[in-house]
Amino acid sequence: MKKNNSRGSRINSDVQRVISHVIEFEIKDPRVNSLVSVSKVEVTNDLKECKCYISVLGDQESGQKTIEGLNSAKGFVRKRLAESLNMRNTPEVRFILDDSIAYGVMMSKKIDDIVGSSSSEDEDE
């Protein structure tokens, strides 16, 4: 949905809230990592599809297993969405691994390393 559309952003935030709650408290799949967050949700204008970006704390393998576990629970998540939100259509949920947080941490570490090494060079002079 468009970012400037208040209805669309409200639907996106409502869907994100419900999916976050379902993942945190209701899914019991051992493949789903306990340190999971829903970083972003995009619902189409016709309410038929939903892209759910998932951020997982851990390595890439843990992220892939979490996505597999969530994909096996798609029907359950969709059922909980239908029960929680009064929408014309309940969207098909597609889970996508979001590694932007890990990328940001990596870049921050690289910047700290560069700043740290340049400050130690300044002290040597």
Image (tube, grey):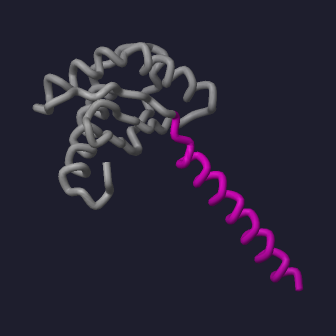
Viewed as shown, does residue 96 lie left or right of 47?
Answer: right
Residue 123, position in %: x, y? 82, 81
Snapshot quadrant of residue 108: bottom right
| Chain part drawn in magenta | 97-125
Decide whether the magenta segment is chiefly helix, strand or loop.
helix
- Residue at x 62%, y 32% (from the top left corner): 59
Q: Position of residue 4 (x, y in %)?
A: 28, 61
Give residue 26's quadrant in the image.
top left
- Indicate left or right for 115 with 33 as reference: right
- The residue lying at 21 percent from left, 22 percent from top is 80
Looking at the image, which residue is at 35% across and 14% down? 28
At x 31%, y 48%, the residue is 1
Which of the two residues, 43 or 78, is positioned nearer the viewer here? 43
List x then y, in percent, for residue 77. 29, 21
Residue 91 colored magenta?
no
Q: Is residue 65 above or below residue 125?
A: above
The residue most toward the bottom is 125
Please tell me which residue lies in front, 6 or 29: 6
Q: Nearer the viewer, residue 122 or 1?
A: 1
x, y percentage for residue 12?
27, 44
* Image quadrant assignment for residue 3: bottom left
Residue reaching furthest to the front? 46
Residue 106 in the magenta stretch? The answer is yes
> Which quadrant is the C terminus positioned in?
bottom right
